[in-house]
Amino acid sequence: MRNYLDVLQKIEESGVKAWLVGDTVRFIEMGLQPEIITLAIDAQDMYHVARTLGTGTVDARGPYPALRGELLGVPFRAFGLRGATIEDDLAYRDLSIEAIAIRSDGGVVDPFNGRLDIRNKVIRLTGDNVELIGADPLRILRMLRFAAEFEMDIFWKTEADVRKFLDNHADRMSEIPSERWGRELMKGISRRPNRFIEMCDDYDLLPYFMSELDELRSVYDDKGKTLYDHTLNVLKVIESRLDTNRLMQNDAFVLAGLFRYIGTRNLDGSDRTKVTDRKIREIMTRWNIPSGTIEEVISIIDRFKDYYEPITEERFCSAVLEFSPDAVEIALEFAVCVAESEGFFDEYSEVLESNTWNLAQVLRRFRSVSLQMEGATRYLTGREVMSLLNMKPGRRVGELLDGLDMAVGTGKVSSRAKAEEWLKAQIA
């Protein structure tokens, strides 16, 4: 914790009282490494701190102005105190595990026993104050997100109060803007998607933010399993591998698992149409998901079944050039996860392993270009092709470069010299 206290003390050298708060303290208490230091200071002191320390910019937009900068090589953000004292500020925070502060001398301010709740792995409303939920009902989703991500239990009184609130104030939940649901949902599914969705379901929240998923309970396969069950099964497989698989640490990957059956009433999805893709776009656009992520999700869902058939290196090369290496790897990995979740992995294991091998060879060859050419993606640029072949700019140059890419990906060209030989052969 020494480094965090050094930053805190540096802030206080400007003559301003400051505390470590929020996620920074929670991470410290959980033995985790905070990505950024979160501080509380008097809001009126933000510009003074920035001027005195010569770092940081005050962002005054929104209800909570913040000073953002870097000190001692550590990024920080400082929010204004809510209330006259640090204790007042902590009382505004929704969960006890977030209502802890650390002073510059290392002392801890913990009026709501948040550290004890962390040790006991319990999620509790700060001060058992249900009015915090009334002030912002989306805090319910935040509570479930923390419970899912850190495998914590909801304190019995908090659970009772939240369920009572939901019973009596369904209208308040319906009034939450879709983009706010989306922001919190993306945080919730990024680490423990299956557990998070199950907890949302347990609190009957699905109809509020994704009624289309809730409706999949009424569609059964021939074994009595619903499309909702199939969705949770693939999320369970994804969740089990999120911590160890780089490819799965991708918003589109988890969203593909969540949206796989949205817009289709058919179990194998063979009747997917542009109409169903439009439904997926519609929901994620409401959630304010970036358009690039939306297209990646649809691409994964539309293409993953291709990999249950043998794919040649040539086809993989074409796919990599059309989409991207990561996009092709993710679609193939998604096919593996679906096969495992549906219980037919053994049937397709040889094909999937062969496809994984073929893709790896293609990617290895493309990466070799970058290593040989100090980061360049091709052995030759368009200008170099024109100089080598005495050509003028035009479509033919692009066609030769595309053909050269295919030759590289399929192993026919493995150096700059061989690239020149290959090009000369094309016009001989």
Image: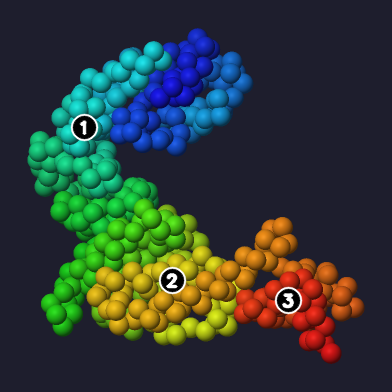
Q: Is mark 1 in CB contact (under 8 Å) with mark 3?
A: no
Q: Circle 1 — which element?
A: helix
Q: Nearer the viewer, mark 1 or mark 3?
A: 1
Classify 242 as above or below 40: below
Residue at position x 44%, y 61% in the image? 247
Q: Amino acid at mark 1?
A: Arg
Q: Residue furthest right?
A: 390
Q: Which residue is mark 1?
A: 119
Q: Position of residue 32 (x, y in %)?
A: 36, 36
Q: Nearer the viewer, mark 1 or mark 2?
A: 1
In the picture, measured across the screen, residue 202 lies left or right of residue 410, that is left
Q: Rounded to the nearest whole Å, what is the CA distance between mark 1 and mark 2?
A: 40 Å
Residue at position x 62%, y 80% in the image? 410
Q: Rounded to the nearest whole Å, what is the CA distance between mark 1 and mark 3?
A: 60 Å
Q: Position of residue 71 (x, y in %)?
A: 55, 25
Q: Which residue is mark 2?
A: 331
In the picture, measured across the screen, residue 142 lies left or right of residue 120, that is right
- Is residue 9 visible in this depiction of the protein? yes
Q: Which residue is mark 3?
A: 401
1 or 2: tag closer to the N-terminus: 1
Residue at position x 30%, y 82% in the image? 347
